[in-house]
DNA sequence: ATTAATACTTAGTATCCCGCCC
DNA sequence: GGGCGGGATACTAAGTATTAAT
């Protein structure tokens, strides 16, 4: 990987210029963000006048545009003040929000068209007025009872009992024939059951998208849950599993032992060979030791975790070798935990929680060259946890003998519990599942904002094209950054604290060493070569021909800078976003990613798909369109560990199939010849058979070859991220309708649940 | 105007699980 | 019937963006 690269050393530490140097800038609007920062990376560079010099010829008048209000902007562009552009954004300004959102009203109409009558409606409107705990609990109870007593369920149970009964009889009777019959029937019954369940689920689904939205930042009116689920306490090792220091067995205190085990469990992982990881681990481990232990254990190299490691491996092995029954028992136990802790009641609806389990302690595994890798991630106790729920709800009980840090009732946030994590000092939250109302609504909003960008993207583009010629350095930098964000779907690139995280960058935090300028490259003019580590230390490498003005600006920005200096030294993400939100309500840098991803999917689908294709071809086309987006967004994955092997296996299969085909062809020829010579019926039949064999072989071969290319193309590309986070699901739903492809071919169950709102409301004529 | 805190989305990897092939 | 490939799910790190505090 290019990950080892120069960044580690190449990144220049701040050679701070003192603040008084900046006095020269005073009065100048364009102030470097870095020069004002105490840890400036920007070194002595020419003063702003020099930087600005080339601009002087630019006759562009002082630009006021930056400060124009949205209305002005739209007026200037000759656009009517779009009604729906007010969508949900007012609330961000803390103003009262308009009561009805246009898009919602519109959609509501659509949804209702196909709405099935359900008793739920009544309950909802009933509860809309006021939520008392009593009411909610009552509803919940009723729901449960309803479910329990539903005739459907009773019937199901009956069917199941019958099956069980039959199985018993069957096993006692004539084993073979009855058994087969049984499985067949069982399958049938299972099918029916499944369908019933599906239908039921559909009935139960909360169609929140047909309801009124809450005003302001209110996220819920009633919230009740059981609190988080804690991992089991540490069980000290049995005496026969020993830890050795310097060749001598040492019985560790439970606290030190637990941490030692964390390390031992990872011994087969590359992490444990890295110095940073080892040092961080050792430092934190020693903190957990008793005085004596700390005195004794001073060198990690002298530690022998062999027996701990072995024990861990044995455990993993044992788990793998568990019988079906044992596994079933565990599964059921887990199910029970999910039933109890995995759901909450939100405004009278039962919603799945996304991560109700507290993260167990362990060693921190950062991505890439993380300076904190190997540090101890401490066990979270109830005393660390803040609970958020309704005042009038049943407040979750802390585990026996413990207390919560705090219980609060804040309905302007969506989390149920939170705690501060010790490694990075950041906050972690327990929140709802992606299929919940809270997440779904936000997702819908996100795509609506991105969609709105469609209407003004042209003017925004022409504006930043103009800004490339601005007199002000700041404006130019912003324009170039925006150009990258728009054209290449780069992330915004917030500033990060040095030394706290791996050295990764986004657009605004690009440094001069991350790009190379080529006047001419591979027949293209003005090529920028990007090479940097982005989010999750995924390498972004790309050679892009850019507009001449952009190229020249870049050269200017890089003048008199050296490795480690910011490319956009006068730009921050918040300034950029401030500017963007003045152009369109709700517009931020990341909206461009969503917008470009979705619009690309739509275009690609239109371009590639053919109504007359068969289903497999259509699906291939969908995947290709999806892939185009994934490539644009640089969604990569490590090639599966087994990739080479499985590819070779597939190739071997293809080869052997080819041989088979050749042979079959030969035989067919022979058979044909024989059949011709004496037209015996038998021979003809043989010939037909051979023919079919050949055909089958060819089909299989083709399928495998397609599979091979598909897999090869997907080697390093992850489709799921874009599918889940960037592609407006309504595009896909509409495409399925138009192409007559079942939605299940595109979205699995989880995805259909997450996008239930889109599945329900989208017609074939949807346009992003 | 910065910085810090907060809240929430986006991201890749590990693991589970299930059907398929030998 | 056991291993294997791959999809689904679990997990949690790492981003973005806004708000609050200084």
Image (cartoon, coloured by chain):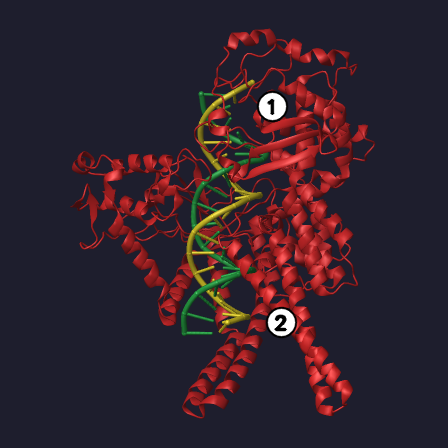
Chain colours: A red, B yellow, C green
Q: Which residue is mark 1?
A: A567
* Residue B20, x across and y down, in percent: 55, 70
Describe residue A316's horizontal placement relative to residue A696 as left or right. left
Seen at 73% across and 27% down, the residue is A464
Q: Position of residue A316 (x, y in %)?
A: 34, 58
Pick the front one: A63 or A200: A63
Q: Is residue A239 left or right of residue A185?
A: left
User: On the image, which quarter does residue A198 sit in?
Assistant: bottom right
Label 2: which residue? A660
Compared with A299, A211 (above or below) is below
Q: Is residue A189 visible?
A: yes
Q: Residues within 10 Å of mark 1 (few under 14, many from 20)?
A: many
State the count of labels. 2
Q: Position of residue A616 (x, y in %)?
A: 69, 63
Residue appearing at x 49%, y 14% in the figure: A16
Mark 2 or mark 1, which has the lower sequence index?
A: 1
Identify the subunit bearing mark 2. A
Q: Residue at x 78, y 85 (%)?
A: A676
Residue visible at 58% across and 12% down in the picture: A45
- CA separation in Å, label 2 and label 1: 59 Å
User: Label 1 is found on which chain of the structure?
Assistant: A
């Amino acid at each position: 990987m290019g990950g080892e690269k120069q960044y580690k050393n190449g990144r220049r530490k701040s050679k701070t210029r003192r603040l008084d140097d900046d006095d020269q800038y005073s009065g100048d609007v364009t102030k470097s963000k870095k020069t004002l920062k105490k840890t400036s990376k920007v070194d002595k560079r020419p003063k702003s006048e020099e930087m600005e010099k080339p601009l002087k010829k630019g006759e562009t008048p002082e630009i006021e545009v930056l400060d124009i209000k949205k209305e002005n902007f739209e007026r200037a562009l000759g656009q009517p003040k779009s009604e729906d552009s007010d969508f949900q954004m007012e609330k961000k300004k803390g103003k009262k929000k308009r009561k009805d959102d246009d898009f919602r009203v519109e959609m509501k109409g659509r949804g209702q068209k196909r709405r099935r009558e359900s008793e739920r409606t009544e309950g909802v409107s009933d509860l809309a007025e006021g939520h008392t705990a009593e009411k909610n609990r009552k509803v919940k109870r009723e729901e449960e009872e309803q479910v329990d007593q539903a005739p459907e369920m009773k019937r199901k149970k009956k069917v199941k009992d019958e099956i069980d009964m039959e199985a018993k009889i069957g096993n006692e009777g004539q084993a073979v024939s009855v058994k087969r019959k049984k499985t067949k029937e069982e399958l049938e019954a299972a099918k029916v059951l499944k369908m019933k369940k599906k239908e039921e689920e559909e009935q139960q689904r909360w169609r929140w998208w047909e309801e009124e939205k809450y005003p302001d930042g209110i996220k819920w009116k009633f919230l009740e849950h059981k609190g988080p689920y804690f991992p089991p306490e540490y069980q000290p090792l049995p005496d026969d599993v020993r830890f050795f220091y310097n060749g001598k067995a040492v019985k560790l205190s439970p606290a030190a032992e637990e941490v030692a085990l964390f390390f031992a469990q990872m011994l087969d992982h590359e992490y444990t060979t890295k110095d940073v990881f080892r040092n961080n681990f050792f430092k934190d481990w020693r903190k957990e030791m008793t005085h004596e232990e700390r005195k004794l254990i001073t060198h990690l190299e002298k530690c022998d975790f062999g027996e701990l490691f072995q024990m861990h491996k044995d455990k993993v092995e044992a788990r793998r070798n568990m019988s079906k029954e044992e596994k079933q028992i565990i599964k059921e136990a887990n199910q029970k935990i999910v039933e109890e802790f995995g759901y909450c009641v939100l405004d009278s609806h039962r919603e799945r929680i996304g991560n109700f389990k507290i993260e167990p302690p362990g060693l921190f595994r950062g991505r890439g060259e993380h300076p904190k890798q190997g540090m101890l991630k401490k066990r979270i106790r109830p005393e660390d946890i803040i609970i958020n729920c309704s005042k009038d709800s049943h407040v979750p009980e802390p585990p026996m003998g413990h207390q919560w840090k705090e219980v609060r009732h804040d309905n302007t946030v969506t989390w149920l519990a939170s705690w501060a994590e010790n490694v990075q000092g950041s906050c972690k939250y327990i929140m709802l599942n992606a299929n919940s109302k809270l997440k779904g609504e936000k997702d819908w909003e996100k795509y609506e904002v991105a969609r709105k960008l469609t209407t003004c993207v042209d003017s925004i583009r022409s504006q930043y094209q103009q800004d490339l010629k601005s007199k002000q350095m700041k404006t130019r930098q912003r324009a170039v950054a925006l150009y990258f964000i728009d054209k290449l779907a780069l992330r915004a690139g917030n500033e990060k604290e040095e030394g706290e995280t791996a050295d990764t960058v986004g657009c605004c935090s690009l440094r001069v060493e991350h790009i190379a300028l080529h006047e001419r490259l591979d027949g293209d003019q003005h090529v920028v070569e990007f090479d940097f580590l982005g989010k999750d230390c995924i390498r972004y490498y790309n050679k892009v021909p850019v507009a001449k003005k952009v190229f020249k600006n870049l050269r200017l920005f890089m003048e008199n800078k050296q490795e480690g200096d910011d490319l956009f030294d006068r730009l921050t993400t918040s300034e950029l976003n401030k500017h963007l939100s003045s152009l369109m309500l709700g517009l931020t840098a990341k909206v461009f990613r969503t917008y470009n991803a979705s619009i690309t999917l739509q275009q690609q689908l239109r371009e590639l798909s053919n109504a007359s294709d068969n289903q497999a071809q259509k699906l291939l086309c969908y995947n290709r369109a999806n892939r185009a987006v994934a490539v644009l967004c640089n969604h990569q994955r490590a090639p599966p560990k087994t990739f080479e092997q499985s590819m070779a296996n597939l190739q071997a299969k293809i080869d052997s199939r080819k041989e088979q085909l050749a042979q079959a062809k030969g035989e067919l020829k022979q058979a044909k010849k024989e059949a011709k010579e004496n037209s015996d019926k038998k021979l003809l039949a043989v010939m037909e058979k051979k023919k079919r064999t050949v055909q089958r072989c060819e089909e299989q071969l083709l399928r495998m070859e397609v599979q091979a290319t598909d897999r090869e193309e997907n080697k390093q590309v992850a489709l799921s991220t874009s599918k889940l986070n960037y592609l407006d699901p309504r595009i896909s739903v509409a495409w399925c309708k138009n192409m007559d492809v079942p939605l299940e071919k595109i979205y699995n169950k989880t995805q259909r649940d997450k996008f239930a709102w889109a599945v329900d409301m989208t017609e074939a004529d949807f346009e992003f």
